Image (tube, grey):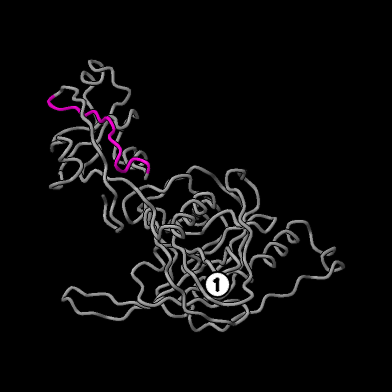
Amino acid sequence: MNTTLERLSDNDSLAATTPPITASPIAPADDLDLLDAYSQAVVTAADRVSPAVVAVSVTGTVRDARGRSHPQSGGGSGFIFTPDGFVLTNSHVVHDADRIEVALQDGRRATADLVGDDPHTDLAVLRIHLNDLPSVQLGDSQSLRVGQLAIAIGNPYGFAYTVTSGVISAFGRTMRAKSGRLIDNIIQTDAALNPGNSGGPLVNSRGQVIGVNTAVILPAQGICFAVPINTAKLVASQLIREGRVLRAHLGAGGQNVPLHRRVVRFHRLPVESGLLIIAVEPSSPAERAGIQPGDVVVSFAGQPVTGIDDLHKHLTGDQVGVSSPLEVIRNNELIALRVTPGEAPISYERN
């Protein structure tokens, strides 16, 4: 049976038209005594975080097969993570939007500026200019444990400030972004997510944000994913500082292939597969390094390469402009080259 990885953006304008919903005030101590520990944790976390959760509405244009432009609206969720109005959401919610507007729980609305967008991690940072803004506390996704409480807050199908809860189901999952790169260390949870939850916070029992909700697997139930907040912290800081996340690229396209056992044994390779180069862009770092179609990349910068995902992991921003060793198998011979990666373009295309 086929499964589909579904990003959680909302493709209608319901989120933009749903009236603001005011959260229940924090319950008095006597009322909290009537709740069990689980309920107390969910109520407390939701009360702390919900005021900083926003509904994100976007408008833009799309072209049909005949090249005609049509208006399109959509939406998702986000959360304010600094008192001066920086908002974290998903890239796929706001990418290519002509206009972005956010609605707060207290009824205020504001036009948002796109500070930066990173399709490779499906994260984006917005900025709104309002006074007295609530903000969330960011947690540490590295300290999470399987089975601990996870609470999702967002705007599924435009139902504003919906709270669902579950547990952390697993760590270390990978999810392929629209750019073709893998997002590593994805958090799996069974806290229910639906279209419109994209960009909303995943929260622990202390009301700390531990992830950014991003996708579900269809038609499965209870298999939902969030980008870990530690990844989001690094990406957000670069987007605020530079407006982009610096990554390296070689300018070559390829596919994963197995290596012949005789080649692996003869050259004492630490890998049994590599990246077969299919095409090399003119005047690219790959062409200048002497990489040719038909080469099979097996290592880069001293690290083994079993395929395209390994190479993407090694092509960090630190590699831009740095001459690094690269080994390829060419006609069953191991060839040592040196390549100086360039800066990767920002797009949804593989690079």
**Magenta stretch contains residue 328:** yes
Residue at image coords 27%, 80%? 70
**Magenta stretch contains residue 1:** no
Pointer 1: what residue?
A: 54
The image quarter containing residue 322 is top left
Disc 1 crowd, CA 10 A, few/some/many (<14, 14-19, 20+): many
Measured along the vertical axis of the image, is residue 326 above or below residue 78?
above
Residue at image coords 80%, 63%? 35
Disc 1 residue type (three-letter)? Val
Left or right, 220 with respect to 167, comes to left
Measured along the vertical axis of the image, is residue 291 above or below residue 136?
above
Residue 325 on image: x %, y %: 27, 30
Residue 135 on image: x %, y %: 62, 66
The image quarter containing residue 25 is bottom right
Which segment did they paint magenta?
318-331
> Is residue 166 visible to us here?
no
Left or right, 295 with respect to 113, comes to left
